[in-house]
Amino acid sequence: MKEKVRVRFAPSPTGPLHIGSARTALFNWLFARRHGGAFILRIEDTDRSRFVPEALDDFVSGLRWLGLDWDEGPMTNGKHGPYFQSQRTDLYREWGHRLVELGHAYKCWCSAEQLRAARQEQQRAGQRAGYDRHCRFLTSTQIAELESASAPYVIRFKTPLQGATTIHDLIRDHITFEHDQLEDLVLLKSDGFPTYHLANVVDDHFMEISHIVRADEWIPTAPLHALMYEALGWEKPIYAHAPLILNPSGKGKLSKRSQAFTDGGQEVLIQVREFRSAGYFPQAVANFLCNVGWAFGDDREVFSLAEAIPRFDLKDVNPSPARLPYSKLEWLNGVYIRRMKPETLSVAIRPFLEEAGLAVVADMLVRATPLIQERIKTLKDAVDWMGFFFATELRYEPTLLIGKKMDAASSLAALQQARDMLASLCKFDSVNLEEGLRQLAGKMNLKPGPLFGIIRVAVTGQKVAPPLFGTLSALGRNQTLARIDRALSHLEGLSPRD
RNA sequence: GGCCCAUUCGUCUAGAGGCCCAGGACGCUGCCCUCUCAAGGCAGAAACACGAGUUCGAGUCUCGUAUGGGCCA
């Protein structure tokens, strides 16, 4: 076993950073940090047809946002670069041919038509599908002939026909594959580009990767890779196949989805950047991801990555696939929000308000933030909870102004008296407001609830809003009175008096 | 269809043979607090897929079945 822990996260730049990939990256990172090892970022960009140029930026910003820093890879130094597979194709070609020289791989000249015909023949005969190994058994004269015709070929791995390969996996112990179930897969394509298998094995070897932590879905390729290491005489890394993340329905893996969708009313986020723009904190998302497939211990659910590092071990990762408990993320994000300093929170909230088109007033924001801190679950929630502070004109159904068990006329009278009292109140702060309004309710023989409700709608335009007295005081006397005046005219419209 | 993986409350999980008539968390329900909504407090409902075996004893080990999933076709 290699003495130094070196792990890698090796995404293909085919789209934005997926939450499932992020979880794999997180486990790699935790493992590296736990053992004082290196976390390497490698970009597997040999598939030109699916290449998305913006993907790299998205990976970089997504990983950084989550707090996962890499020791080697794009934008950092490293002795094992380059870290883009597209810049290493000579290496793959070299080792692909070396495998042929060593007798562990062979050139295959079969055309697409030949392959299709062979497959159909196998199906008809009820045999196992897969390449029929035609070129594996070519005679040397046949090979020489094809070589001299310089016909296009691929390089296939020569899988042993008998025996079995056992993969040692940190998360699931041993997994054994019979060789007669394996295929002679393509390593090097006819255009000279490597397949995933070749590039992966070559890179992991030369980058001195000690542990391969990847998703469950790669288990079937593990025996091929192990066989390749053996053929090349290279030391094998240790495998750890992390459980898959499933769709919320439990049907199918989440990775198949590329962007957010709605499932039974629940918004299902897929891309890391979607979590970000939905108003989740990176600490909460990272914490949340840790709790799927792994447990901190001591019945603790809330913790930082720094706290997780010393306790993390791949051996403790739960092998069964899981869905993301999104409702738990909401709760967790709320926990982080409640723990923050209000000033910090208001800074985080601001862009979300602006995004919603609100004209944010800085000191109003600072005054209002404590009122909503324990009520919002995401930063985006702030738009609904404090948007009215910044609205120039409130829009609401005037009948909402009618108090519970009251009519328009009595509501109008109550609001009018409240307005007079608020206008004359000596100090417009929470304590005074509460005292004044409660006294007023008593004087008018009203229960406080209905009265406060009328004022709440008048001032916020909503039936549900932050605590009334704090809201009024944060809003200030002028705004409060102006909004009440508007409400009074609404009520007058509802109760025409002669 | 072949190979492979997995299976504890609705969900995420703890549990490495007796500490488990199974613990925590989210969610849900009820009560308390209360100006609405939250937050908080208290209480509650809720699970070892099934069947054999090993063992004095199995959620925990073995095998089979079922179900779900992955890869390939």
Image: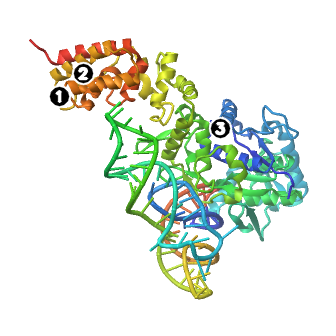
Measured as percent of width and height from the top left, residue A213 is found at: 72, 52
Cα–Cα span, label 3 and label 1: 52 Å
Quarter of the N terminus of chain A within the rendering: bottom right
Query: Which amino acid is tagged 1?
Result: Met
> Neighbour class for label 2 at 10 Å: few (<14), some, many (≥20)?
some
The residue at which mark 2 appears reads as A398
Crowding near pointer 1: few (<14 within 10 Å), some, many (20+)? some
Q: Chain of mark 2?
A: A
Viewer-side label of 2, 1: 1
Residue A276, quarter of picture: top right
Amino acid type, callout 3:
Leu
State whether discs 3 and 2 lie on one chain: yes
First in residue order: circle 3 vs circle 1 = 3
Helix, strand or loop at mark 1: loop
Q: Position of residue B62 (x, y in %)?
A: 64, 77
- Taking A241 as reference, is A398 above or below it? above
Residue at label 1?
A: A406
**Disc 2 to disc 1, C-alpha distance:** 14 Å
Residue at 71% of width from left, 48% of height from top? A309
